[in-house]
Amino acid sequence: MSLPKTKLTGYTYAPETKLKGRVVPGSESVFDFWASVQPETSQAVTKLLPSGRENSYRVKLLTKHELFLADERAGRNCDQVLIGGKRFDIMIKSPWKNRVINHYEYVAVEVE
């Protein structure tokens, strides 16, 4: 059985820099990718989210495309994805490398 996939728009960010002592955010790059978007309501996931984000609307993404968390690349914001006209931060990443259907499972949290 195959899950339905949706074409999504993603956003990734270059590293931030310092200019005259001020932090300048990195530039934004846009890309498209395919993913299955599923509801995410697990209490176990709620406990893994940062304080203040645990009650935000969230979804699960299943895709072959690698997205990045903020702590994976120093000085960069986490990747974001556009779903239904709203941006979501990529907060949790689970790679599945089982040699059958390699993919990534993400939890994305709505940006408020």
Image (tube, helix red, strand yellow):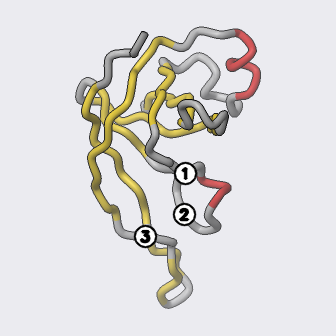
For the residues carrying marks 2 and 1, which lies nearer the camera in this image?
Answer: 1
Question: Where is 108 relative to 21, above or below?
Answer: above
Q: Say whether marks 3 and 2 touch (CB < 8 Å).
A: yes
Quadrant of image for the C terminus: top left
- Image point (31%, 23%), residue name: 5
| Residue 39: % across, % down | 47, 12
6 w.r.t. 71: above or below? above
Residue at mark 2 = 76
Q: Residue furthest bottom?
A: 20
Q: Whole-percent x and y of residue 45? A: 69, 20
Numbered mark located on residue 5 in the image: none
Between disc 3 and disc 1, whose residue precedes?
3
Q: Residue at x 76, y 21 (%)?
A: 47
The reply to whether callout 2 and callout 1 are in contact (CB within 8 Å) is: yes
3D distance between C-alphas at marks 2 and 1? 9 Å
Residue 94 visible from this viewpoint? no
Residues at marks 3 and 1 touching, judged by CB atoms closer than 8 Å = no
- Other-residue count near label 3 (Cα within 10 Å), few / some / many at <14 / 14–19 / ≥20: some
Task: Return the x and y of residue 74 as percentages of the image width and height.
Answer: 64, 67
